[in-house]
Image: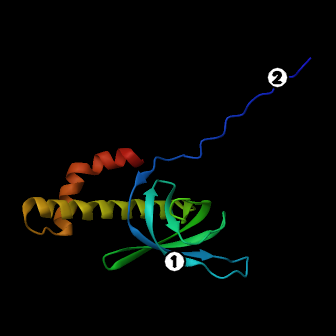
């Protein structure tokens, strides 16, 4: 009698909804246990989720490496730590797509706030164009929060 072989479905790697988001960042791989050269570079976020983010790099970064990200906005720099969970080469661009997950809830929360700040900044630019005059980040923030914060909250939490 033949045994019936069960097929196992591959688990879904996507635990959180990803949102396309483009903001600059710099990264530095932290090698505490290796003597490799420290890899670092400039990049741009491709997408962001509650659990991590995706960015591209000219160089390969090993899976499970700890990485420090610095995300600038105007005159401030936000720093977070994450772990590389995926690194795959994009055949079209030749760059590596690096997926990282946040190791601490504080880092995930920081990135969520950074994303909101960038969205508000884009909103400020749009409203300035619509009104034909510059509006402050504070004005745009108040307006954006009034209009979009509940919808934004539902998307993430």
Q: Residue at x 73, y 76 (%)?
A: 33
Looking at this view, name the residue that lies furthest to the right. 1
Element type where label 2 sits in the image: loop
Marked residue nearer the N-terminal end (2 or 1):
2
* Viewer-closest of 137 and 47: 47
How much space separates mark 2 and mark 1, taking CA atoms?
A: 51 Å
Q: Residue at x 37, y 65 (%)?
A: 114
Q: Residue at x 32, y 64 (%)?
A: 118
Looking at this view, name the residue that lies furthest to the front. 92
Left or right of 17 in this view: 76: left
Q: Which residue is mark 1?
A: 41
Q: Which residue is mark 2?
A: 4
* Viewer-closest of 79 and 129: 129
Quarter of the figure with the N terminus: top right
Left or right of 133 in this view: 62: right
Q: Is residue 110 above or below residue 157?
A: below
Element type where label 1 sits in the image: strand
């Amino acid at each position: 009698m033949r045994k019936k072989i069960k097929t196992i479905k591959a688990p879904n790697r996507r635990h959180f909804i990803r949102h396309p988001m483009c903001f600059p960042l710099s990264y530095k791989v932290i090698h505490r246990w290796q003597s490799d050269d420290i890899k670092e570079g400039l990049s741009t976020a491709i997408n962001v989720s509650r659990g991590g983010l995706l960015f591209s790099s000219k160089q390969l970064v090993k899976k499970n490496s700890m990485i420090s990200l610095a995300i600038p906005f105007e005159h401030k720099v936000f720093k977070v730590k994450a772990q590389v969970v995926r690194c795959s080469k994009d055949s079209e661009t030749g760059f590596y797509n690096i997926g990282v997950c946040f190791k601490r809830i504080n880092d995930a929360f920081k990135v969520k706030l950074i994303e909101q700040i960038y969205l508000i900044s884009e909103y400020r630019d749009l409203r300035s164009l619509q009104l034909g005059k510059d509006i402050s980040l504070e004005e745009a923030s108040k307006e954006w929060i009034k209009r979009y914060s509940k919808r934004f909250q539902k998307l993430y939490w």
